[in-house]
Image (cartoon, grey):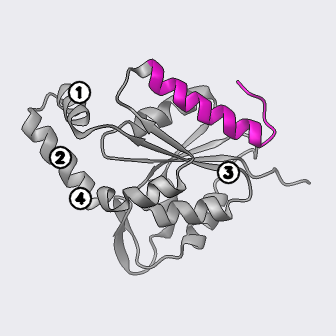
Amino acid sequence: MRQPATPPILLLAGTSEAGKSSAGEYLAALGARRVKIRTVLVRLTSGRQAYHEGMETREDFGYDEFVSKLLELPDDGETPLAVESFIDAALATTVKRTWPAPCAIIFITAPELVRIRRLAQTRGLTADEAQRIIRRKDERKRVHEQIPAWRAIADHWVDNTADIITFRARLREAFQTIQTSSGGIQP
């Protein structure tokens, strides 16, 4: 029996509260298989615990080991994967370098004031509360120190300042590009 091909993959990264989950939802609506990075990291939890990508995982797991766990996810080999939310540029680089099918990184960002306003409106917070949440998340994820690395490796830099139509158009473009480069049919 012939093994299915490895699917193309989109890695979603970005600043805190910039729209990574919304991007994952939209890519799933376009036909991608949405996978939270946590799903893969849970498979790396045996051994000494360490904090990584927003969860407890095994200390010093190898990035190639992460790729192996990602490859173990059941799939038909044709449906593109959309994996969210990467916070480690080095891990994303390894996945992109070693993935045996087309792989693209989408970095989603928006100015802090836009993220604060959106988070405050969505969750019914004050601007100060939303700002504290965003700044804590960005600090924990080392977002600002990694921006130069993300700029160097991102295939699509999406500024989510504009309206939802513009945001989705950029995501659709990335989705179509990954499908075209893998020989898939454009939606």
Q: Tell me the CA gap for discs 3 and 4.
A: 34 Å
Q: Amino acid at mark 4?
A: Glu
Q: In the rendered view of the protein, which quadrant contains the C terminus? A: top right
Task: Check disc 3 and report the residue beneath it.
Answer: 74
Q: Amino acid at mark 3?
A: Pro
Who comes first in sequence, dot 4 or dot 2? 2
**SS label for mark 3:** loop
Please determine whether, in this image, residue 79 is positioned above or below residue 105. Answer: above
Report the span colored magenta. Answer: 165-187
Question: Do the residues under discs 3 and 4 have CB atoms within 8 angstroms?
Answer: no
Q: Amino acid at mark 1?
A: Thr
Q: Tell me the CA gap for discs 4 and 2.
A: 10 Å
Please determine whether, in this image, residue 97 is positioned above or below residue 161. Answer: below
Q: In the rendered view of the protein, which quadrant contains the N terminus? A: bottom right
Instruction: Tell me what residue is drawn at x 25 percent, y 35 percent.
Output: 115
Return the x and y of residue 123 as percentages of the image width and height.
19, 30
Please determine whether, in this image, residue 97 is positioned above or below residue 48. Answer: above
**SS label for mark 2:** helix
Task: Check disc 2 and report the residue beneath it.
Answer: 133
Q: Nearer the viewer, mark 4 or mark 2?
A: 4
Query: For this rendering, which residue is in front, 112 or 38?
Result: 112
Q: Nearer the viewer, mark 2 or mark 3?
A: 2
Q: Tell me the CA gap for discs 4 and 1.
A: 22 Å
Label number found at residue 122: 1
Q: Amino acid at mark 2?
A: Ile
